[in-house]
Structures are given as C-alpha cells and as structure tokens.
Amino acid sequence: AAFNGESEASGGTARAQITLKYDEKSKQFAIRIGQLRGLSALSPQLGRKVNFRVAILPCPESSACLFRTRPLDAAADTLVFNEAFWVSMSYPALHQKTLRVDLCASDTSHPEECLGGAQISLAEICRSGESFTRWYNLLSSQDLGRLSRK
Amino acid sequence: AAFNGESEASGGTARAQITLKYDEKSKQFAIRIGQLRGLSALSPQLGRKVNFRVAILPCPESSACLFRTRPLDAAADTLVFNEAFWVSMSYPALHQKTLRVDLCASDTSHPEECLGGAQISLAEICRSGESFTRWYNLLSSQDLGRLSRK
C-alpha cells in the first residue's frame, strides 16, 4: 500500500493540542493551547524560539482577535504551552469565524516566520459550555506553498 | 456586545458542505464536496467560473492527492457540486494528513486564483466507515493574507 513509510510511530507530523469552549451565558469563547508534539517535522532553525499565533478571522479592525503564546526554546520535540485566550463574542458571530493557529519562529535578528498551522472552522462549534480537546495536525507552510504552484 | 452587526442571517460567510469517510476494509478515504453557500462573501468576479480544489497534504511526489471539481458559473449564491473523490491510503498515513479544500476562480484569460478555503486536520478522523457531513466556513484568502502583515 502507498504511504507505508509514514506510520504514526515515525512522528512525521507536528500536532497541536487545542481546547475550545464556548459559554453561552457569559458569551465568552476560550481557546487553550496545550502542547505541541513533533516540532522537528516543521524543521525549526537552531537557536530560534517558537510561539503559537492564534487568530479568530475575519477580524474587524476594532476587535481583539490576534493572540500569541510566550515563545519557548525549540529545544525539544514536545513543548508544553498551556496558555488560554478569551474572546467576547455572540454565538451567531462566532459561528461565522475561522480559527487559525500557527506555529511561528523568531529570534532577535529575524521577524516572525510561521512554520505551519491548523485552521478550524467554527461553523458547527457547540454552544453548550462544554470544552473539547483535540489534536490537530499542523500543515507546514512549505507543503501549503507547494500546492499553489500545482 | 461586539460583532452585533454580523448575525448569521446576514450571510456574511461562505460555507462548503463536505462529507468525509474512511473505510478501513478497503483502505479508501472518500471526500465529497456537496454544496457551496454564501459565494458572494468571497466576491468572485463577474463572468468567472468557480471550482473546488481538494488536496490531501503533505503529498509525496508519487501520489495522486490533488483533485478538482468541475467549474460552475458563479451565477448564484448557492452552488451544488456533489462530486466525490477517493484516495487509497492506510489509516496511520491518513491520520497524519491535512485536507485543504479551496474555492478557486478561473476564466479563459486568467490562471486559477483561490478565493478562500477550509483546512481540515485528519488526525482524529474516525476509521469506522461511517460518513460524516459538516459545513465548514471558508476563510477568504484576503482575510488570511491580512493576518501575515500583523
């Protein structure tokens, strides 16, 4: 069969653990960035730090919809962030949004460069107030870029 | 509350109806593009046709992982595609993939230009053989592009 070389055990994919929760009473949407696994799949350069950039899009000019975790040394394949962000938004408005979660690298002499990311449609997110946690594959910017040339 | 102007009724979001199914027995992954709603939110130019470009990434050189629906006239806000694509892949391999579904516009004098898209992590897709259908918000390329300049 095709792709046999890419078993789960090979660790060929970077994944982010993300928890989402919408509380209808407080009209707050919470995004928690838990862990990153498989960082090496995104080939960060030595000595750089990495952080997650979290955006709720589209974003009206007047609103806060862009957040960043603290940067961590890209020294291990698994990094624990455990940072949460809250946004005030009505349920119908949230329902029309898309969450982008990108892993970005930076150092003192380079601007932020995003290595890969996940994109999560919030069209069918539950309004119950229960949180749900999932692992999302991070598609590398390189692989995505190759697509536009096909 | 913020975002009050953007109620669900305003139809401000383009959405694609996508059905996914993995059959462990046949080791086939099926992607069905059903309908598109809210095309006007992606501002297609008059006279152009639109099609969905479906990609399973990352894509080894040797594999078929890029598909396109037939192009339809961008003449209505709702377009029915109802096209399905099948890919042979082991479950562990699929588990590491990300599905990109982009709505692209083209005409005889312009190359394909993608107006917006959804990205679906297949890290937690079910192997049961049951199909599941969901509506996914299509994030416009414009809104995504603005993000990289912040």
Image (cartoon, coloured by chain):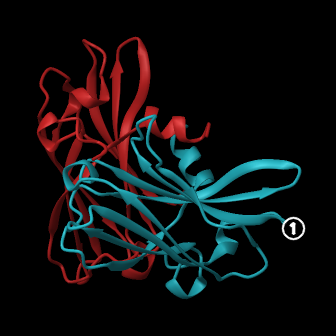
Chain colours: A red, B cyan
Residue B26 lies in quadrant: bottom left
- The residue that appears at 15% across and 43% down in the rendered structure is A8
- The residue that appears at 45% across and 76% down in the rendered structure is A93
Which quarter shows the N terminus of chain B? bottom left
Q: Is residue A57 left or right of residue B103?
A: left
Residue A105 lies in quadrant: top left
Towards the viewer: B48 or A131: B48
Q: Secondary structure at mark 1?
A: loop
Q: Considering only vertical position in the picture, is A41 above or below B11?
A: above
Q: Considering only vertical position in the picture, is A32 above or below B69?
A: above
Q: Chain of mark 1?
A: B
Kindly tell me whether residue A99 is visible in this rendering.
yes
Kindly tell me whether residue A59 is visible in this rendering.
no
Q: Considering only vertical position in the picture, is B83 above or below A103?
A: below
- The residue that appears at 34% across and 63% down in the rendered structure is B29
Q: How far across and how far down the image is residue B5, in percent?
A: 56, 78
- The residue that appears at 25% across and 79% down in the rendered structure is B130
Towards the viewer: B67 or A134: B67
Q: How far across and how far down the image is residue A47, in percent?
A: 25, 12
Q: Which residue position is annotated with label 1?
A: B47
Residue A72 lies in quadrant: top left
Q: Is residue B73 left or right of residue B10?
A: right
